[in-house]
Amino acid sequence: MRVGIIVLSWNSKALVDQCLSGLLKFEGSPVYVVDNGSEDGSADFIAQKYPTVTLIKSPVNLGFASGNNLGIKQALSAGCDAVFLLNNDTIIDEPFLEPCVRILVQDASVGIVGPVVVEGHRPDLVQCLGGKITLWNLGFPYIGAGLPYKKSNKVEQVGYVLGAAMLIRREVVVATGGLDPEYYPAYVEEADLCYRASLKGYRSVVSHAARVRHIGDSSSGGKVNSFRRYTANRFLFGLKHLGPGRFLIASSWMVLRTFARKLMLP
């Protein structure tokens, strides 16, 4: 199975350098870097230091979904059977792709696979074993956060795979149209993709045999901005996927939680 690895980058020269240096050391799949309108010289730096990667330049910041969709389109056009989305704030210090690809090859019902995402500077601790989708309150809680990471052959079905490191079968992209740009600039789009894939009959799973280190929050704009974007996109998810009655109940829970959260923020 031919896999294209897509790295989305925006104004983060040091992070993407760290990511690509490890990625090219441990994995041999073709790499597509989408420069999302950077203004810090990232694109020229990548072109000079990493001539073997395919560099895709966007003149503006398209956000997570549309930026990754540029890379997905080019990788699939080049004949890739699957794409692996990898955040530029990941640290690659060991191979991670093969256990994930093996699952796609062996099980046609699986459409999306993630490795275990561990803390960037504490690789012994789990950051995310995938997440749950709770429609009654439009919640997307992480699974396993803070647990010790133990490598195993376990394959765990989840509601969604974290977008920082996710392998997507070509057929899922075709069936769903890819990531939804409405979730601009970021948050919830990976849960939305996994949910729409499930409606098409594809499962999302996490392989405990693979791990990727993830720093996280490198370009979120701070705690308050992150919370606002996340909350707005939760409402968007509900508008897309719930009927009027269910949306009213779920959004009421969200409003209460949002007010409670706002009281705790500076």
Image: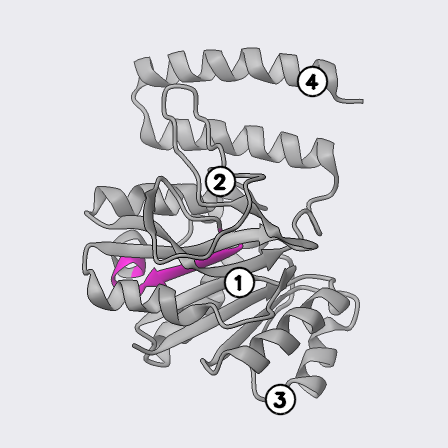
How far apart marks 1 and 3 lie (CA) works out to 19 Å
Mark toward the start of the polypeptide (1 vs 3): 3
> Which contiguous range is marked in magenta?
163-173
Mark toward the start of the polypeptide (4 vs 1): 1
Which callout, 1 or 3, points to the residue nearer the camera? Answer: 1
| Residue 262 numbered mark, or none | 4
Query: The C terminus is located in which quarter?
Result: top right
Circles 2 and 3 in contact, beta carbons < 8 Å: no
| Residue 188 numbered mark, or none | 2
Say which amino acid is labelled 4. Lys
Pinpoint residue 18: horizontal percent, then vertical percent. 70, 70
Circles 4 and 1 in contact, beta carbons < 8 Å: no
- The relative height of residue 236 versus residue 167 in the rendered view (above or below) is above
Badge 3, how many Cα within 10 Å: few under 14, some, many 20+?
few
Mark toward the start of the polypeptide (1 vs 2): 1
Q: Name the residue that disc number 3 marks.
A: 51
Q: Name the residue that disc number 1 marks.
A: 86
